[in-house]
Image (tube, rainbow, N blue to C red):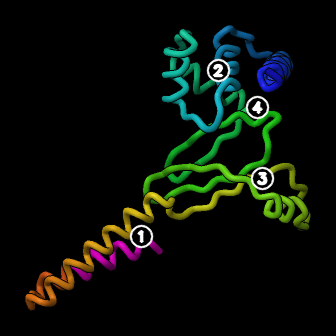
Amino acid sequence: MVEKTRNMEVREKVKQLFTEYLTKRKHRKTPERYAILDMIYSLTGHFNIESLYTMMEETAKFRVSRATLYNTLILLLDAHLVVKHQFGTVSQYEKCFDQVTHHHMICTQCGKVTEFQNAQLQADIESAKLTRFKQTHYSLYVYGLCSKCQWKQNMKLNSLKRSKDKLARSGDSKGMKAINKKKTEINIIKG
């Protein structure tokens, strides 16, 4: 119950900040913009324009065009109520008002994004002395392989090893070259 009350307070505060932003810049205060803001602040985690579009239509029963979503996201980014992340080639967004600092692990194989917190890492970054630069906030992205992709890769390597052993026993040098090439490709991905 406390969490729900807190969430409602944050949503009201964000709505107030957005209203002030729109007023100051002489933008229209449309029901669509507020519905998008409310939907974003009801979400947990990351979203993209397509997923937001679907949620607006299915969950909120509020039809808006992709152009309206895109234009509203630009306003929300400028108002510092939403942050944009570039995870590889994919753009995702996340609410940022009153959020706990967190970091992101991105799997380079499957694209899975996992949030994590590390107090020591956060303290080190926040206390870093940056020459002629005042830090206001930061994002940290750690790229690598998730445990599921590591497991898949190990299974492929083990399968190739078994095939290589079988070919070695049969004396098939052409097959051995193909296996070694595939194993090298997997090791390059593995890093």
The amino acid marked with disc number 4 is Leu
Q: Which residue is mark 1?
A: 189
Disc 2 secondary structure class: helix
Whichever of callouts 1 and 4 sits on the residue coming sooner in the sequence is: 4
Label for residue 138? 3
Left or right of residue 7: residue 89: left
Q: Which residue is mark 4?
A: 81
Disc 4 secondary structure class: loop
Which stretch did the figure color magenta?
Answer: 179-191
Is residue 120 shown above or below 65? below
Judge whether residue 57 is colored magenta.
Answer: no
Whichever of callouts 2 and 3 sits on the residue coming sooner in the sequence is: 2
What is the distance, in whole Å, between disc 1 and disc 3 at their CAs?
28 Å
Label for residue 39? 2
Please say if the residues under marks 2 and 1 sit with CB atoms less than 8 Å apart: no
Left or right of residue 2: residue 172: left
Residue lying furthest front in this view?
1
The amino acid marked with disc number 2 is Met
